[in-house]
Image (tube, grey):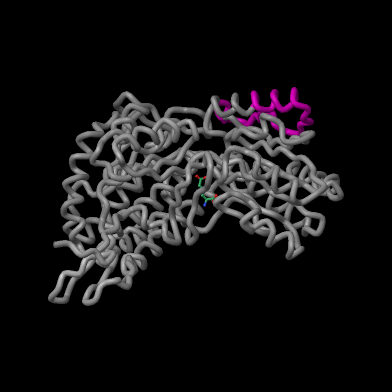
Amino acid sequence: MDITRELAAFGLALPSDGDLTAHSPIDGSITGRLASSDATAAIDRAATAFTQWRDVPAPRRGELIRLFGEELRASQDALAALVTLEAGKITAEARGEVQEMIDICDFACGLSRQLYGLTIASERPGHRMSETWHPLGVVGVISAFNFPVAVWAWNFALAIACGDSVVWKPSEKTPLTALACQAIFERAAKRFGGVPAGLSEVILGDATVGAALVADPRVALVSATGSTRMGRAIGPIVAQRFGRVLLELGGNNAMIVAPSADLELATRAILFSAAGTAGQRCTTLRRLIVHESIQAELLSRVERAYSQIRIGDPRVAGTLVGPLIDRMSFEAMQSALARARTEGGTITGGSRVDVAGLDGGFYVKPALVRMPGQTAVVREETFAPILYAFSYTDLDAAIALQNDVPQGLSSCIFTTNLREAERFTSASGSDCGIANVNIGPSGAEIGGAFGGEKETGGGRESGSDSWRSYMRRATNTINYSTSLPLAQGIQFG
Ligand code: UN1
């Protein structure tokens, strides 16, 4: 596929030389050839940039992000088009992804005037205690193919406002969108003037390039989005050198549908969160736990909605489900479905769909799988549009089932019963980082903290007070008296 024109919108020439190949999932063809980067050299530059950037007043740093947000607004369609070509997202979702970038820039710009610390009452006379938040250092961002630009932007906008520099290792499957983001940032940097070279670095390559980033002691925070397997590999390496991690790993997100639920609302939420993005969001709905009294009715509604989904070229208006990222993903889906069958599942959909002219793309019908219960395959995350459905009779048992998976990212309940809703969001309710009522598990706004517990990794990105991960805290005790009282009333000498 020739994407010369799409890249030209960012002033980029088609990269045609190098050891890495970029593909489009739309038809499986090669879109460019790129060279692997030298991670250490990039970290060198970022480390130097940090020593300058940390002294720039935070609101001024926020101004750079404000300009970046302006440039993103101007490039929204062009960047979305590239996201569609490289990640296979339908246009509406690709634009939505860029919208998340714009939103986080607005958030980070405001935040740059609100990096507050506490003032704490000292136990000693003539003393004052306070907390100061300082820039942290070089932040390494490892991102996944499924949100090739937004998740980086959540990290980037906060990190830059917090006074850090950023080295970004995008997914090997989406290098071109990363280069486009860098080009957009450079426009903002040029307008800002005086941005230190190396403040934003992009490093391309396979896992060895990522490994160099993870191991480097100058990288104060490694923020990584991807599989639990990846998180398990990098966590101990960063821990070994006492660096910080922010992990956003697998999800196995559930929806409980209670007898009082608005089934029309639930059906629409299921459609978007289970089939949308071809089931390739961390927050995708994967488990549907339905009260037995409404199971037949709800599943027949879902089946009806699924049968009307248009699957195909994500560039075409009206398409709701684009391609899977690649053959491997298709094969993982098929093997999960085969396992589901042996574990007692009845499958609707799930087969490959031929799209005229796009033979190399892996298009599938989203699968709805009626399961006898929460079997082994259901407890695993398969990054594809498979929705496992099973029933419950008692809400406490349903909540226990929802929690009985290794992952803990997102969850929701559909109910109009206040007691059930409150129970679900209470301390003994959902154990996930995200617990919604009458909203699907995906499509979170940037204003909240995003992330989850257990094998999801425990990190929080994006809104609320996630910025604290990108800064270091200093406790300052100031003595403005003429004596030296010791804490705990100690008399010494
Ligand atoms: C991801 O899938 O890695 O909540 C992130 C959502 C999006 C982000 C998903 N705002 O679905």
Residue 358 part of the magenta segment:
yes
* Image x and y of residue 413, in percent: 69, 54
- In the visual, does 312 lie left or right of 289? left
Q: Is residue 336 above or below residue 48?
A: above
Q: Is residue 68 above or below residue 201?
A: below
* Residue 11 in sight from this viewpoint: no
Residue 262 x %, y %: 77, 59
Looking at the image, which residue is at 32% across and 70% down? 120
Q: Which is nearer the eye, 246 or 308? A: 246
Q: For residue 304, what is the image quadrant? A: top right
Q: Nearer the viewer, residue 371 or 397?
A: 397
The picture places residue 439, in percent across and down from the top left corner, at 65, 57
Count of numbered marks: 0
Q: The C terminus is located in which quarter? A: bottom left
User: Which residue does the image show at 72% across and 35% down from the upper left?
Assistant: 374
Left or right of 241? Residue 48 is: left
Residue lying at 46% horizontally and 49% vertically, measured from the top left: 80
Name the one closer to the observer, 386 or 437: 437
Residue 279 can be seen, yes or no: yes
Q: Residue at x 70, y 45 (%)?
A: 400
Could you tell me residue 404's position as x and y percent?
65, 40
Is 302 situated left or right of 293 in this image? left
Q: Which residues are magenta?
A: 334-361
Image quarter (top left, top right, bottom left or bottom right) of the N terminus: top left
- When the figure is inspected, residue 467 is found, relative to residue 44, above or below; the finding is below
**In which quarter of the view is residue 122 placed?**
bottom left
**Residue 71 is covered by the magenta coloring:** no
